[in-house]
Image (tube, coloured by chain):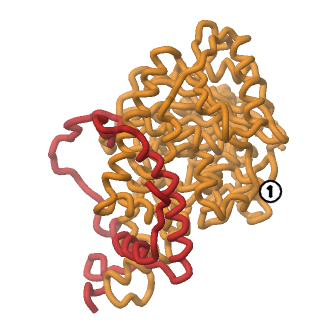
Amino acid sequence: MGATVIERDEVLHVARLARLALSEDEIEPMARELSAVLDHVAKIAELDLGDVAPTAHVVEITGALRPDEPRPCLPREVALAQAPVVADDGFLVPSPQA
Amino acid sequence: MSDFIELSAVAAAEAIAGGSLSANELFETYRARAAADRAAGEDGLNCFTWVAEDAPQAFPSTDAPLAGVPLAVKDLFCTDGVPSQSGSRILEGYLPPYTATAVARLSGAGTSLLAKTNQDEFAMGSSNENSAFGPVRNPWDRTKVPGGSSGGSAAAVAAGLAPWALGTDTGGSIRQPAALCGIVGLKPTYGAVSRYGMIAFASSLDQAGPLTRDVRDAALMLRHMVGRDQCDATSLQFPEAIQLPTAERLDGVRLGVPDEFTGEGIEAGVLEAFQAALTRAEQLGAQISEVRLPHAPHALSAYYVIAPAEASSNLARFDGVRYGLRADDATDLLDMYTRTRHDGFGPEVKRRIMLGTYALSSGYYDAYYGRAQRVRTKIAADFRSAFDQVDLIVTPTAPTVAFGLGEKTADPLSMYLNDVCTVPMSLAGIPAVSIPCGLSQGLPVGLQIAGPAFSENRLLDAAHALEQSIGFDGASARV
């Protein structure tokens, strides 16, 4: 793999996927720093990993389910206590399309 | 300085239980010291994001195992009604409605919450310079970093502003600051301690553990943290009780030294202290041999794909809807999300979210995330083969002693290289402890000892024998 170069357009695309606004002065450094890090991690492309199984988690646990019994949950007023804006006993957000 | 500031947590708990020390006096002394650091702002070490305003109304009974000994807790642990901000502006002032299991267990065993400690934002960093609440300073030299991400916890314990502290380690965030501050830091086996109530960074790697003055304190804290928790499906019952270590010798213990971590990239002064510790281990009866961890040089690359990938997913929850910061005057919902995250996250967190999102995005997933997960398999297999030949593996904890504030902030990659010796154990999910093994340029050097999953008792025994022999004196770092 040659030197990884992340362009401005790609930075903006990934930022949109990540729901992250970037100011104009953040874009160029982000492109440069992502390129440098990705270039470094690209070394793993040199390894022969054909038949190696991926590890998502080191702990093997299956069926770690508790009994499905009703139990008290967080009271509504406690759940709403830290919300930036509350209306009608719920979290108020701006309209999806203003 | 009160004499009992020099007591280990084990000794303080014994003194309280024996009636020669009052829990209230101990708490008030530490509370005053911690509050003074917080009040000093930039002139202090900046270890804390919150300090208790009063002593607790009631202390546990003196026969509780931890007898009221005060505990400092890393900011990212949720503590009911006490600010828990994970070093981030996006959670500034956040008061959780519940307490993390690790904290709840320690308080159930008798600790009293003294303070919350400063940290790199969302535990992303190796210098504690990424905190929204300002950098922490190293008590050995205030122009140096304390390491990170549990920098406030490490500096507070080293400086005698807390008897001990709780931290978290994802790729070295307990061990590396412990090394740079001259104290003991233990990352337990993945799953040994519940992650419930820890504000998540990378869920397959995050693990809570102690930062303490000595090895016995680390064992005592660990004893009261471990165990299965119904609220964390990846937590496991620890197979045996954690003992307070007493070993003075290492007779018959086979220590493996991976040459991948004793050559290029490790500072000469660090290697010198490391070699001296190996000589000491031999004098104590240990057999030292070389082991190979052939994929370990790729661990850092795998880590800096996997951890940001998990972080990009975990940090999706910070969207300005249910808690924390919300950007004003949003034109619509998407605008509110993107501007809230722009305003609330610091530069390193943005970088990791971008890196993780890129590595998981369509067309790149297999090349980055898929490959990194396969490297992880190979790294775990390397350790398994090594532990067929040796009992424990020893390396330097960090490639350098504490570096200057601001020295590495301009180059993220050079900062990431600090984690080179600690991330392999994180990827393999195995326990590792850092103990101080000497000074280089007047700054502490850490020795890392790693063992197979759930070998904490053996690990701590070996660490104790070495600690007793080395006789490291951390008193000059006390404030």
Residue B429 visible at all: yes
In what quadrant of the picture does the N terminus of chain A appear? bottom left
Q: Which residue is mark 1?
A: B143
Residue B64 visible at all: no
**Element marked by disc 1:** loop
Camera-side residue of B342 and B7: B342
Image colour for chain B is orange
Quarter-of-image position of residue B212: top right
Residue found 41% across the figure and 31% down from its top: B380
Quarter-of-image position of residue B237: top left
Residue found 24% across the figure and 54% down from its top: A72
Q: Relative to B318, is B246 above or below? A: above
Q: Position of residue B85 (x, y in %)?
A: 51, 62
Q: Position of residue B335 (x, y in %)?
A: 37, 84
Chain letter of the residue beneath label 1 in the structure image: B
Image colour for chain A is red
Camera-side residue of A29 and B192: A29
- Going by the numbered disc 1, the residue's amino acid type is Thr
In what quadrant of the picture does the C terminus of chain A appear? bottom left
In the picture provided, is B410 more to the left or to the right than B110? right
